[in-house]
Image: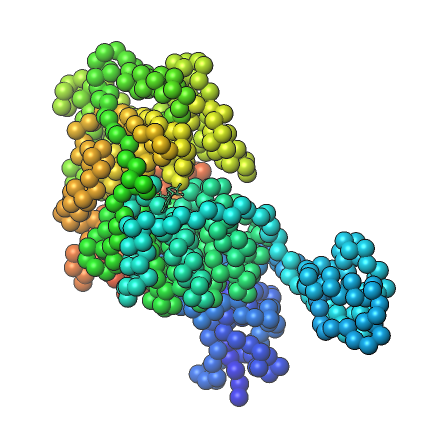
Amino acid sequence: MDLYAEVIVNSEAIELDRTFTYKVKEEHNEIIQVGHRVKVPFGKGNRPVEAFVIVLKCEGVEKIKGIKNISRILDEEPILSRDDLKVIDFLRERYLCKYIDAIRTIIPVGLMSGLKNKKKQVICFAKELEGKLLEKENYKNLISYIKVHDGEFSKSEITKKGDFSIYILNKLIESGFLQVKEEVVYRYNNRVYEEDSRNRLNEEQLNVFERIINSNKKGFLLKGVTGSGKTEVYMNLVSETLKQGKSAIMLVPEIALTPQMIERFKGRFGREVALFHSKLTPGERFDEWFRIKRGEASLVVGARSAIFLPLNNLGLIIIDEEHENTYKSENNPKYSTKEVAKYLSEIKGCKYVLGSATPSVESFYEALEEKIELVEIKNRVSNKPLPSMEVVDMREELKSKNLSILSRKLVLEIEETLKRGEQIILFLNRRGFSTFVSCRSCGYVFKCPECDVSMTYHKNGYLVCHMCGRAQREVKVCPKCSSKYVKFFGAGTERVQDEVKKTFPKARVLRMDVDTTRTKDSHERIYNSFKNGEADILIGTQMVSKGLDFKNVTLVGILAADISLNIPDYRSGERTYQIITQVAGRAGRGDKKGKVIVQTYTPENASLNYAINNSYDELFKEEIRVRKIMKYPPFSTILLINGQSKFEDKLIKFMNRLKIELNKILEDENDLELLGPTPCIITKIKENFRWQIIIKGDISLNLRKKVKDTLYELTKSVYNDIRVSMDFNPNNMA
Ligand code: ADP
Ligand code: ZN
Ligand code: ZN
């Protein structure tokens, strides 16, 4: 019977984003499987290209004339499993990515650029000596040595290490007492870690652990205050999963993948842990991928893309700091790791645990709706107190002619802390574009009345809302208090460092931000240096806000809480709450109580006060109320369609045509809103103008497909000039 394969070719081109049918040569009939990587002749010139088999079939293709053969099968085993193929469909349907984008997310980078496993020939024990050989000491010694180091060393390594003769070694191989095997060598850090000391779970931890193990729910939200010992619970859950013969994935935000975290997991689980994050070389990623595929590692600690690793018999996925926006991918496929985890739990039957001290509004809402189970740890380990928090009103500083970034109160506290020989973290929440406009005198911030987000300052003198496009002229006088201190906001960590040095010339100061952590080990160096007490003050951005466990830090200063309050995004309140709580959680982790100073121009702001009072429930109530009114997630999905081009005229014309076409599709849908087109917050990147359209509402899979088809159709004619991308519930609207 004739066998045919539907394949996806390895190409970026939109017009090739579909399956192509090939014939399977008879000699391949018995070998080929779905998921195999193959070579096929492609196009008029029969150029050889790589492709992936996603369907095998015997019928339904009689009519295709001139059908070509698959020329080669590239790997022994299929690269993609049946589950992988389901995940690929999931990614395509949900995030509207191309087949090849989904495939590339799942397979190791490097596979298609020709990386291969490194192999070496190792010596293994085969059978016991017999007869005359039993009397020969040399032979006996060598056999005993190999028994201890079975499969570890090559011939030359053995003769060097053990001072054995190559003659005897060869002799034993020839007569079948020893055996040569081919073994894959991993480009892998074999460093041995100190065993991590185990803590006996306290009552709250144990309760959470048992509920997760015994519940028949699949998804869980673990809400536990900072320092409540969530990591300890995770490790116990992982242990239990491994004990049952299953495997586990432990995800952490990229920047929380600190040496400390790795130490703890490697120390507890040893070589069974695979690491997977962006700092690995392609070779290392490749090796870890295959180590996992072969079942030689059953626990992965990694950043978001580790969720796609080919673990056998997956039993558990943990997503730590689940509220972090790094779990949303910003490259194609622009997936949400939490949605992928939920999908995996459906097709593989595994459990997934979302953990956070400050759960995202969406996750907490799901828990209240009982789609996932809520489990809580309300106290810090050993009942250590949470740090005390104090707000400083920066408007008062202005009135008293203090124009410094540091308030008088903070300066005083820093002095005291330095005197006691304790350490300080100063946090500046800086996002790429912090260009909201506010009054320094009364704290008034310009917001869009329609969308409830801060308006963004543009150099052309306009304030623009990036949800709906409303624009107004820049105002020089505060509409509320008539002060002239209306300015756009922004300060860098470098300036903070200068001021701190000027104010405290004797203090030893370290800075941790993107600029100081460019090289491979710089992050670890700054971390260790501060941990070892080589500095008194650590100044940093997001990087210092989480995962760090320094016992001697007793003071945390949050320099400009306003920045996160006024990001032009419907999540600004939530983000503020999260960031303040997380940073504050760095203080007082040792035996001494911690203190947090929060500087702001709007001390009356609600989210800020919820954070100060540690009242998550209040924050949630307020957020969910506003989101319901404004129809923001979780009550809707937001689709951001971004267009880029060197030619602004063409782009605007295109985006307007797109709007007309999209409106046709949306016609028969209730409750869907189309906003725009408007210029993006970042209006131009590398000579490319940027415009966007937003669709807001309950966007079904069916509708997603229609949007994609429309877009594919429209872009055909402008393919070379305009690039379009789509993002569901994007991290930011920039
Ligand atoms: P979280 O992840 O919730 O912020 P961690 O898991 O980092 O908290 O725990 C905070 C500290 O408490 C760590 O130093 C950890 O070793 C310690 N710890 C955790 N659980 C226990 C326990 N049951 N008994 C004693 N110490 C614990
Ligand atoms: Zn004012
Ligand atoms: Zn608006």
Residue furthest toward the front? 135
| Residue drawn at point x = 21 percent, y = 42 percent | 616
Question: Can the viewer see residue 413 in this picture?
Answer: yes
Task: Give x and y (percent) for residue 358.
Answer: 28, 44
Closest to the observer, 267 or 87: 267
Q: Is residue 405 above or below residue 469?
A: above
Q: In the displayed structure, does residue 363 sit left or right of residue 83?
A: left
Q: Quadrant of residue 244?
A: bottom left
Outermost residue to the bottom: 1
Residue 447 seen in render = no
Q: Is residue 398 left or right of residue 94?
A: left
Q: How many marks?
A: 0
Q: Please say which color scheme the image uses.
A: rainbow
* Quarter placement of the C terminus: top left
Residue at the spot 42% in from the left edge and 42% down from the top edge: 256
* Location of residue 411 (image quadrant): top left
The extreme top residue here reads 401
Relative depth, front residue between 721 and 704: 704
Image spot of residue 591 (x, y percent): 35, 32
Task: Ligand 1: give its quadrant.
Answer: top left
Instruction: Say if 674 sits above or below 89 in the image.
Output: above
Q: Nearer the viewer, residue 675 or 530?
A: 530
Where residue 679 appears, as percent x and y from the top left, is 31, 40
Q: Residue at x 71, y 68 (%)?
A: 125
Q: Residue at x 53, y 65 (%)?
A: 295
Nearer the observer, 428 or 583: 583
